[in-house]
Amino acid sequence: MSKPLARILYVEDEPDIRAIAQMALEAVGGFTVIACASGSEALAAAPAAAADLLLLDVMMPGMDGPSTLKALRELPATAQTPVIFMTAKVQAAEVAQYMALGAIDVIHKPFDPMELSAQIGRIWALKGG
């Protein structure tokens, strides 16, 4: 039996996208979302976040999604936490690269805010905790 998904550490540098996704995940999905604007912010928040899932944007200034994941994997709190990447870069080779980094799935941008929680729920049920 997989553990229920409750807490999501979400990293997205674009304020509008971050706000929409956070609102959708909290209001529609009932999740607790710890939203971060950068990889370094996520690293600072991760130890206390107690996240069940990492939701990472790929294209970010400074630390991109894969770099953020690599750094999060070095922290005890997030060493084993399942990760989903969110990106507009969804060519087959790119998706294969994200999966090779350990992602359980990739959500394509632009995403449907009303569908996002259900989509994450389906992924979690199949491959998550």
Image (tube, rainbow, N blue to C red):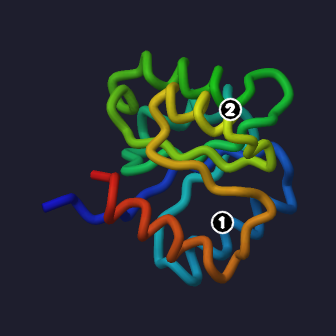
In the image, residue 9 lies at what x, y percent? 53, 48
Q: Residues within 10 Å of mark 2 (few under 14, many from 20)?
A: few
Q: Amino acid at mark 1?
A: Gln
Query: Residue 22: which disc?
Result: 1
Write down the quadrant of residue 16 in the picture.
bottom right
In the image, residue 62 lies at what x, y percent? 82, 21
The reply, left or right, for residue 56 in relation to residue 78 is right
The reply, left or right, for residue 80 in relation to residue 18 is left
Q: Mark 1 near mark 2, Cβ–Cβ under 8 Å?
A: no
- Residue matched to label 2: 93
Q: Amino acid at mark 2?
A: Ala
Q: Earlier in the sequence, mark 1 or mark 2?
A: 1
Q: Nearer the viewer, residue 40 or 73?
A: 73
Q: Nearer the viewer, residue 28 or 129?
A: 129
Which residue lies at the image location 80% right of the left edge and 63% below the top edge? 110
Query: Residue 128: which disc?
Result: none
Which residue lies at the image location 71% right of the left edge and 56% below the top edge? 108
Task: For marks 1 and 2, give the CA distance.
Answer: 28 Å
Element under disc 1: helix
